[in-house]
Amino acid sequence: MVASFAHTVRSGFLAGELAAREPALTVRLQRGLGVAEERLRGFAAEAEDPYVARIVGHLIGTGGKRLRPLLALVGAEFGERDPGIAVDTAALAELVHVASLYHDDVMDQARTRRGAPSANAMWGNSVAVLAGNWLLAKAARVAAELGPEILQLQARVTNRLVTGQIRELTGASAGEDALSHYFAVVAGKSASLIAMALQSGAIRTGTPETTVQALAAYGEHLGTAFQIADDILDITAASEVSGKEQGKDLAVGVASLPVLLALANEGPEAEELRELLTAAGRGREGAAVVPRAVALLRDGGALAEAEAMMRTRMLRARSALDGLPEGAATRMLYALCDVVADRDH
Ligand code: FPP
Ligand code: MG
């Protein structure tokens, strides 16, 4: 079993009760994840220059939760063809994700990712951006080999990822509600790729269109909930557990959901938080503001409110599954809602 698959199991996505309840499916998914992992590592190794291969392979090699490959393989279970043929869609989804992380860590000035130094920390911003471009070009080739429908999907989703990130940077437009803006950003930068993973796996195995659409809707809601959980974990998770720096969003002044909710309140706490984040955003205080900002978010109830919103999205994800055929793959998607909602990294 490859290292990062072991990580997927440890992280709970295929662990414990779920694996015990659906043993045949779990074994099939484990096998698929192992093959997808080999493909992923193989893509990086295809770089002609060994030094480039090392750079583009860096974040693949550090592992990760591999949620997107897992979802591609579960999506493939709904079709009429052998789900084994969907391993390339699993690798494709992770390839796009990893490419986006190279760029994201430059934008967020992140020093660590997946428990290791970020690519920008190791080789600088320019090299990290170019490595992301290399991986995205590789993803386009893989998608082209999977046919025009998957290539078009991958291109549309890449546009959505980039649009989401640009909108995060530009902030809400004049008169736009801050929460609507937040959810538009999250739909683009996170939910779109999670939905794509499910869709591409399902398309690959010839799944009926209505089921593909239900899986896409599930993915959009699950992806939004996943990103809200990420926002909460940025504030609450110790870096040894998350593999990222605790409070990074706060330190660079990113408006995550708990922060938006806290700032929407009146009163001295919101005012104090606004001042702390403005100072952090200007780069004056950075990490120094984090402990006090965390306390304000926890004590003022913003973290609890964000968690309630995450659980509402999870209920919508579950509702999207209503139209799916009864079976092990559908049960797996229900169970994943609980695992994602309760994740600690
Ligand atoms: C993590 O968000 C980042 C994303 C989910 C998407 C990033 C997308 C881009 C940079 C657009 C470019 C895309 C490609 C494919 C090259 P986060 O910073 O909130 O989460 P984190 O805690 O994991 O850093
Ligand atoms: Mg980031």
Image (cartoon, helix red, strand yellow):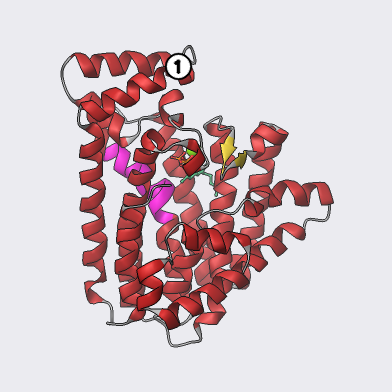
Residue 300 horizontal side relative to residue 234, left or right = left
Residue visible at 52% across and 32% down in the picture = 108
Front-lying residue, 231 or 151: 231
What is the x, y in percent for residue 233?
38, 40
Work out whether residue 157 or residue 284 is closer to the camera in this orientation and state it: 284
Q: Is residue 19 above or below residue 309?
A: below
Is residue 11 among the parts visible in the rendering?
yes
User: Dot 1: few (<14), some (14–19), or many (≥20) neighbours within 10 Å?
Assistant: few
Q: Amino acid at mark 1?
A: Ala
Left or right of 50 in this view: 254: left
Q: How far across and how far down the image is residue 21, in percent?
A: 35, 77
Q: Tell me if the residue at label 1 has its CB under 8 Å from ligand 2.
A: no
Q: Is residue 321 magenta?
A: no
Where residue 132 appears, x then y in whole percent?
Answer: 63, 46
> Does the magenta run of residues contain 187?
yes
- Can you name the residue that lies furthest to the right here? 49
Seen at 50% across and 56% down, the residue is 65
Badge count: 1
Instruction: Say above or below: 61 vs 34.
Output: above
Most frequent secondary structure within the magenta stretch: helix
Residue 49 point in image, percent of width and height? 84, 51
Q: Kindly identify the residue that appears in the image at 62 percent across and 60 percent down.
A: 3
Q: Which residues are magenta?
A: 180-192
Q: Is residue 176 visible?
A: no
Seen from the viewer's position, the closer of residues 51 and 345 is: 345
Question: Horizontal placement of 14 versus 316: left or right?
Answer: right
Secondary element under disc 1, as helix, strand or loop, is helix
Residue behind mark 1: 288
Where's the N terminus, which quadrant? bottom right
